[in-house]
Amino acid sequence: MKFCKKRWLKSGIILVSSLGIVLSVFPSFADDNIDNLQGQTSALESELDGINKDILSLSDEISTTEMQVEILNGEIARTSDDLVEAEKNENEQYENMKSRIKYMYEHGNATLLEMLFSAENMADFINKADFIENLSEYDKTALDDLKEIYKNIEDQKNTLETQQDSLLDLKDELKKKQAELQAKAKETSTNLTDVQAKLEKAKAEEAARIEAERLAQLQAQQNGGYDDTITNNGGHIDASTTDVKLLAAILQCEAHQDYDSLLAVATVILNRVESPRFPNSISGVIYASGQFEPVWTGRLDSVLAKGPTSLSIQVAEDAINGARLAAVADCYYFLYAGSTNRPGVNIGNNLFFPSW
């Protein structure tokens, strides 16, 4: 018995020594070291998630800005065409006025006198005299009106171009921020990868240490010892009078004054109201940020102040009561046809299409 006890003690000493040697092979990673790495991982993942959300938000903002630029390009093209037409009308009026002045100069006052003396009675005489007096005044007024129209269109074009420049500057600034965030995301992702690698290494070494303890403990059990402290923790749309007037006004701004052209735009707007991708009210759709050029250029307010045309109001009421233009029944967007080569349906010089 004495010999066996000594042998057991000797085996115990060897076992403890062996356990010390085995455990000394593995670095000592305290729980707070793994916890620290897990905390860093969580913080970096949260930071990366925030950066990615910011990048996504900026991408949406850039997309909206690009859409606004394209819309403004269409409006600038439209006003350029209107300028050409206004200048043509002004030149025609001017040429007609010159022809009348030339005729009166070449034929002297005889023709005018003949016109007066051909009057059948006093009332006819007074009418012809008024006509002669108002002829030159008419030419001057008509020419002045055409010049005013030309100037207004030119001012509108200048305003649109200024807004376009501002949007392009904004787009550049947003893309710069996006590039900065992408660089930061890349750096954060690299740091996260490094920390995750360290964490995996720490977990692997901790697992190896625990396994070494388990094997040593198993050997201890086989030699008569036991440690029980080891654990393993591992249709019809409801609308107010204000909505009808607002819808009529935006239709008047965006379409020619014919029924189909107006109803096509109304169909797009009410398609948006009925879609979960857009605001669910007429005012919400019309005043959504960056969607309709007349909103941010002031043209909509001008029409609202004067009051929409009776045709615009009629189309708005019909659309609210369920009328839609079948050709654009699946469309949610439109642009001035002269500014784009997109595929779509051309109605009244507006091109309609389902998606941007």
Image (spheres, rainbow, N blue to C red):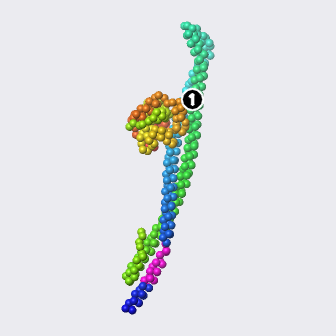
Could you tell me if residue 247 is visible in this image? no
**Residue at the spot 47% in from the left edge and 35% down from the top edge:** 243
Q: Which residues are magenta?
A: 14-29
Residue placed under numbered mark 1 in the picture: 149
Of the pair 47 and 3, the residue shown nearer to us: 3
Main SS of residues in magenta: helix
Q: Position of residue 264 (x, y in %)?
A: 43, 35
Q: Quadrant of the C terminus?
A: top left
In this picture, residue 264 sits left or right of residue 62 = left
Of residue 274 and residue 181, the one placed in the foreground of this image is 274
Please name whichever residue, 252 or 154, is drawn nearer the observer in this view of the structure.
Answer: 252
Q: Residue furthest bottom?
A: 2
Picture residue at 58% right of the left edge, 32% below the top = 152
Task: Please give left or right for residue 29 compared with residue 330 in the image.
Answer: right
Q: Quadrant of residue 203?
A: bottom left
- Answer whether residue 301 is magenta in the image: no
Magenta-span inclusion, residue 15: yes
User: In this picture, is 55 found above or below 271?
Assistant: below
Name the spot of residue 181 as percent of width and height, x first.
53, 55
x and y percent of residue 216 in the render? 41, 79
